[in-house]
Structures are given as structure tokens and as C-alpha cells.
Amino acid sequence: MIKSMTGFGKGETNSRLGTFVVEIRTVNHRFFDISQRIPNSINQLEDRVKHLVHSYIKRGKVNLSLSHKKGKRDFKAVKLDEEAVAKYYNLLEKVRKRFKISDDIRLSHILSFPDILIQEQTEYDPAVLWPIIEKAVKRASIDCDKMRQKEGIAISRDLIKRINEISKAIDKISSLAPGLVTDYKRRLDTRIRDIIKQGGYRLDRGRLETELAIFARQCDITEELIRAKSHIAALRKAFNSSGETGRRLDFILQELQREINTLGSKAGSIIISRQVVGVKSEIEKIREQVQNVE
């Protein structure tokens, strides 16, 4: 099944330790790359969160945020750093006297400094905390994965449509291939007759047959057509495969494009060249879509 690499998911759990909310956003990336914003008090669980998310999301740039709203009984005591207060007060008093400021030093001035009030950090037992966090991460990962699957279905429809167009073009080229030598012989005969009419040249039938044999060998695109059809079958099969489909599709498309390039250069036919241009255009559009496939 094809999945998009773009998605969003949210998971939330409530417990006696408070409410934990996990949000996951994913975008395109060649590999699995996760960035986590987790409170310092629970950052010891980062590796577990990463591995859990990776079990659902195999490829893409993942931005995960975990917020924690503590329960009423979970707040530790808030302490006043008296030493810091004294230092700030003396500093403000020094400034007031130095610049002859008449204003009094107020409580609001002291409290404006960030390290005056200190809240004790809560220490959590990972064994107790992880099952709670795990539920929120799972819910967010599953929610995000569903969105990626839904967008993947839309991408699949577009890719299948384009692959069918490529398949039709390959079939058209296959039907034209047998006539390449006959058409070349007809054009060559016409040119030779024109040359003979212009002045006393004699036709060397042996040389003509040799030229036709060389052309037939050079313009034989049978192998390229067989491989191209094989690559198209592989693309269709990849849609139903599991794992990281995007890389597999990208590789097959590279091989298909190589065969089409060779086919176009060997065929030497305007009609086939037009079909080849159309196929190249479809391949390029597919490769752009595949960049967003997991």
C-alpha cells in the first residue's frame, strides 16, 4: 500500500500525573528523521518515543511535540532565592544612586528577574510514566498514519493512471517497431532511384542488402521493449507491496527512463519519437509524485 509522507496526528492521555498531549507532523524526507520537543522532566523517554513512532512511520521528516499539563497535586513547592533577591536589590540600588533616580525600588522590579522564584522539578519514575506516554504516542502515530494512507490512495490513483498511459505508449511503439526496417528500405530505395536518375550510377544490390542488415540490427528495440514492459509490471506490483515503496518506485522509474532513452535513440522514427517524448513526460510527473511516497 502506498502512503504519503505528509500527515498530522494527535494523541492525548489523562492520568493522575496530569494530561499528556502528543502532536506529530510529517513531511517529505529521504530517510526517517525525527525531531522531538519533550519537557526536560520526561526527556529520558526520548529513545522509546522515537522507536515507537518509527514502528508506524518508516520514512519522512517527523516533528513531534509532547506537552504535559500537570495535575493539581503534582506541583512541587516554589522557593524564593533570597541570595539572588539580595544581589538584584543591591544592583538596582547602585544603579539608582549612580544615575540619581528618585524612584523607589519596588517588588515588581525584583520579580521581573526570571531566577527569583524557583520551582522544584518533579522526578518521574520511567516505569510508571512510560505506559501513559506510550498511549498518547500510539494514538498520535496511528492518527497520522491514517492521514498518510488516505493521501496515499489519491496518489496511487494518479500514478496508476499515468502508468497506464505509459503502457499504452509502449504497446503503440511495439506495433510500430516491425515496420521500421520496411519504412527505411522504402525511403532508401526512393533516394537511390533519385540518384540513379540524376546520372549514370549502377545499383549494387549486395551493398543495399548489407546496409539494410546493419540498420535492422541498429534499430532493433526488442530488448528495450521487453525490459520496459517488465519495469511497468514491477511498478504495478510495487503498489501492493509493504514497506518503503517510494524508494522502490523511484529506482524502477530510473531504469524505465534509461530504457526509454535508449529506445528513442535507436528507433530513428518520428512517430516513435513522439511516443517516447510522451512517455518521458509521464515518467517525470510520476517521479515528482513519488518524492512524497513513503
Image (tube, helix red, strand yellow):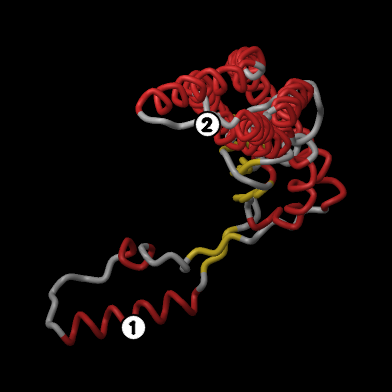
Identify residue type, mark 1: Asn
The residue at which mark 2 appears reads as 284
Q: Which residue reaches farthest front?
A: 200
| Residue toward you, 252 or 92 | 252
Q: Quadrant of residue 65?
A: top right
> Which mark lies nearer to you, 2 or 1?
2
- The residue lying at 76 percent from left, 33 percent from top is 138
Left or right: 194, with 80 as reference point: left
Identify residue type, mark 2: Glu
Residue 221 x, y percent position in the rendering? 67, 29
Total labels: the figure holds 2
| Residue toward you, 291 or 209 | 209
- The residue lying at 12 percent from left, 82 percent from top is 100
Instruction: Say what secondary structure mark 2 lies in.
Output: helix
Q: Quadrant of residue 195?
A: top left
Q: Is residue 81 above or below residue 283?
A: below
Q: Is residue 224 visible?
A: yes
Residue 272 numbered tag? none
Instruction: Say what secondary structure mark 1 lies in.
Output: helix
2 or 1: tag closer to the N-terminus:
1
The residue at which mark 1 appears reads as 90
Left or right: 217, with 87 as reference point: right
In the picture, the quarter occupied by the C terminus is top right
Q: Quadrant of residue 2?
A: top right
Q: Is residue 154 visible?
A: no
